[in-house]
Amino acid sequence: MSGIKTLGQFIIEKQADFPYAKGELSRLLRDIGIAAKIVNREVNKAGLVDILGDAGTMNIQGEGQKKLDVYANEQFISALTSGGECCIVATEEEDDFVPIDSPVSKNAKYIICIDPLDGSSNIDCNVAVGTIFSVYRRKSVEGDATISDVLQKGTEQVAAGYVIYGSSTMMVYTTGKGVNGFTLDPSIGEFCLSHPNMKIPKDGVIYSINEGNYVHFPDGVKKYLKYAQVEDLATRRPYTSRYIGSMVADIHRNLIKGGIYIYPTTAASPNGKLRLLYECNPMAFIIEQAGGVASDGLNRILDIEPTELHQRTAIFIGSPKMVQMAEALMAEHS
Ligand code: AHG
Ligand code: MN
Ligand code: MN
Ligand code: MN
């Protein structure tokens, strides 16, 4: 095993970064890792078992749930319940936040916000999907944790991460001290450190946006797309367009290669489509920790004060130079 560092070993080593921590956060990350492995197992054999297709139900976002949305939601809630380290799970797939009612969990210190399966519309055609999670410290000191424990600004996150179920399965996370990536080695069933101290390139040539919605984009976004498509050798334009339709996979690629991911406001989604608590805040924390920028076009994502559980926002996220250019055009034209 020399040279291999498992997620479990890494988490224990890093606990020294938090001298007052008693190991709860480490156990929480371990619980998420376990649920991710179970979801990975089902995603991998999806075509062989009856888990593809629609569940026949609709979530509060107005989206038809896939069977795997429901399955992943159950697995994460169940792992976090038996782990005992969090008192509330807020998830894309439930109308309300889920209080974890066991005697140990009731007084647990942490709150989890989660997108159990991201990109689920891709699942039936074998395209990469993911999980996104965010960890907050409970603010209230007595009684049951409440909605105000959940509605915290992104700057309050103590950890955030994602799992990508792709051509290989990876978990990437931050506790505010840089970003590390772990690849699942299926032969030993462990996530192993493969991408230490990930940094996003300062500039890039990839832009990721659902351009089919062009007619509904704000003028600033239209201007940015024009900028991206004009020839200019000095700035390596025209850029390359890449859009998978799984936020996790699009942002993971851009983190490695450099790029910008944009989901702006549209006519169908006047406040943006992506959810602040389950998608935008955790991704913003990770990308900032990797040296990138995340904004709603004008303001930093992590500074948005949440007022409701399923709040949405526009997002511009990725390599700093690219996001800053898009922000400049948004400020000028919107
Ligand atoms: P989810 O599957 O968790 O509901 O998220 C879907 C999101 C995100 O993954 C993706 O980037 C985006 O929706 C795609 O939206 P469009 O199909 O509108 O481009
Ligand atoms: Mn969904
Ligand atoms: Mn999602
Ligand atoms: Mn989802």
Image (cartoon, rainbow, N blue to C red):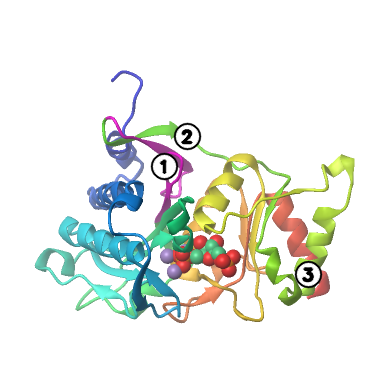
Residue type (three-letter) at the residue carrying disc 2: His
Q: Which residue is mark 1?
A: 170
Q: Is residue 78 visible?
A: yes
Residue type (three-letter) at the residue carrying disc 1: Met
| Residue drawn at point x = 15 percent, y = 58 percent | 82
- Residue mark closest to the camera, 1 vs 2: 1
Mark 1 falls on what kind of element? Answer: strand
Q: Which residues are magenta?
A: 159-187
| Residue drawn at point x = 88 percent, y = 40 percent | 234
Crowding at mark 2 (Cα within 10 Å: few <14, some 14-19, many 20+): some
- The answer to whether residue 141 is left or right of residue 179 is left
* Residue 265, picture quadrant: bottom right
- The foreground one among 103 and 211 is 211
Q: Is residue 97 magenta?
A: no
Q: Where's the N terminus, which quadrant?
A: top left
- The answer to whether residue 5 is left or right of residue 323 is left
Dominant secondary-structure state across the stretch colored magenta: strand
- The foreground one among 73 and 137 is 73
Name the N-terminal-most of marks 2 and 3.
Answer: 2
